[in-house]
Amino acid sequence: MKNIRLAFLGLGTVGGGTYEIFQMNKDLIEERTGCTFTVTKILEMNTERVKSLGLDPELAVTDPALIYDADDVDIVIEALGGIDFPAEVMEKSLERGKHVVTPNKAAVAANFDRLKAAAERGNAEFRFEASVGGGIPALTSIQEALAANDFTEVMGIVNGTTNYILTKMGEEGMSYEDALSDAQARGFAEADPTSDVEGIDAANKLSILMYLCFGIYIHPNDIPREGITKITMDDIAQAAEENCKIKLIAGAERNGDEITYSVAPRFVPIDHPLAGVSNEFNAIYITGNAVGELMFYGKGAGALPTGSAVAGDIIAIARNM
Amino acid sequence: MKNIRLAFLGLGTVGGGTYEIFQMNKDLIEERTGCTFTVTKILEMNTERVKSLGLDPELAVTDPALIYDADDVDIVIEALGGIDFPAEVMEKSLERGKHVVTPNKAAVAANFDRLKAAAERGNAEFRFEASVGGGIPALTSIQEALAANDFTEVMGIVNGTTNYILTKMGEEGMSYEDALSDAQARGFAEADPTSDVEGIDAANKLSILMYLCFGIYIHPNDIPREGITKITMDDIAQAAEENCKIKLIAGAERNGDEITYSVAPRFVPIDHPLAGVSNEFNAIYITGNAVGELMFYGKGAGALPTGSAVAGDIIAIARNM
């Protein structure tokens, strides 16, 4: 069996979740891929975390050059968070011929062309299925099984925090403030929820979806964006009166050469499949000129769902190696 | 650009739809794959159909050996329908090193091991994404992006005819007989609807789903099966009273080493994502130990949606060639 050598940049929620999946489903993954997987390097300051996952703290380094210059690393898993530093480490890894997998939508969306170019220079694979919709395999499907389609529309509920808040407001009559506190108490929202509730996270994901569906690159900062902070119980009531639910939609539509796009709350008719996507679940709804309307639904966040997508990318690379 | 040579066995709904997609999206497919695609052989008696698609009737042959023994065919697209004859032609094509793509669930489900073995002997690819859920990219996702998961459950609404009938009964109060006539008038049901309404078609698809999710092969004839012909308006009313909808579910569940499976009408709670799958739409709902619950939703039949999946398989093979 071929041995694939992995380097983790960060062993937080997603990095740790990915490693746990390779432990939990070891036999099955080896059988399906014909490969074994070994962690050879870890960039992680928290050695307690390294130990608690059952990994050897001797593998931990603090200098990323010891990973991108290493000769015992096949695939780099970037799960650090942030934008500039992870983008730089991914670029250096790719141009040195190391394959890279990342769930980091902010770093991908802000550096798409630069990372693609580095992958070409290094003849390496760059995969980021987990960056949109967590465990939902939409990005791979758009690029592979659906590759015969000319896409005309993509609409996503791609932020679990805001969808949870809107569900609580719509179904339990909670105010925005109470719903946000509830989401924070359950770990669905961060202490500073700005990136979620202002639609910044969703704009990163829409940038990636547009690139894959339409082949155009729009920087996330150039996407018109409205969050959910101004939504009132009156808006919710008005939506219900019109047989709709309010959802934060990251959407883009193409008419000929013209593409319109935005992240904004929208009234979604209750018989539309996206209206049934509740709580922290995500969904991506796309229309192609061959396949028609298609929806992917699942968990958009969390250690194991997001780790599932990262692990799927690692497996795809291993099978190609 | 690499030229990929295609042979179509049958140019009916799906064969013709697949060819139309390669015409309609020619530039885009060439750009995405770096390949051109040429039809070099056609097994089709109806030369009017060949001409009406703009293909040269000189390419049409009536002896399948002229296709599986040909030296100018890379990929065989089997869209004949039936079981034994297409299985034999696929087997011979595969063992002679020709890649095979098919939407034919009955032929695949009844001959899984035989076709897999032929593909190994011939070192050829055998792909059948379109055989379950039409254009929905579930099978590829299960085998690739979700390959790190141990699956515990799979449930599908995988037959559009019965879902259309059940929707009309549930939402418009039509009787079974009226709903069936309506489905036939709209082309969603065949003159002899037995295979659909008795769950035979769904059992073929469940056999394929179980093979991919759990790695076990159950012949479709060995799947306990109940159709929708006995469903009454009283059943519909009782389901509504219990806040449920009746859906024909092709489902399998694994507990440890024990797998239970059946095709049968079930009460599905209205807040379950499968309850919102109406009319001729299909959905596949799976649970993996990493990704959690996931649903794929889309068009399960029709020339272009099913052709989208066949074309996706052709593109995947072309990229690997």
Image (cartoon, coloured by chain):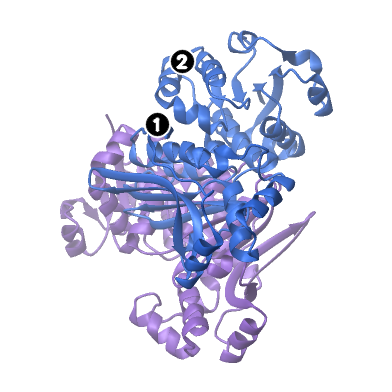
Chain colours: A blue, B purple
| Residue at which label 1 appears | A219
Residue drawn at (48%, 14%) of the image:
A95
Q: Is residue B260 depicted above or below B296 in this figure? A: below
Q: CA distance from mark 1 to mark 2?
A: 24 Å
Tell me which amino acid carries mark 1. His
Residue drawn at (75%, 15%) of the image:
A59
Q: Quadrant of residue A64?
A: top right
Q: Locate residue B110, reporting x and y percent.
A: 55, 61
Looking at the image, can residue B115 be seen?
no
Question: Disc 1, disc 2: CB below 8 Å?
Answer: no
Q: Chain of mark 1?
A: A
Q: Secondary structure at mark 2?
A: helix
Q: Closer to the N terminus: mark 1 or mark 2?
A: 2
Q: Locate residue A10, reporting x and y percent.
A: 68, 24
**In the rendered image, which quarter contains the N terminus of chain B?**
top left
Tell me which amino acid carries mark 2. Gly
| Residue at which label 2 appears | A122
Q: Nearer the viewer, residue A82 or B183?
A: A82
Q: Locate residue A54, reporting x and y percent.
A: 82, 26
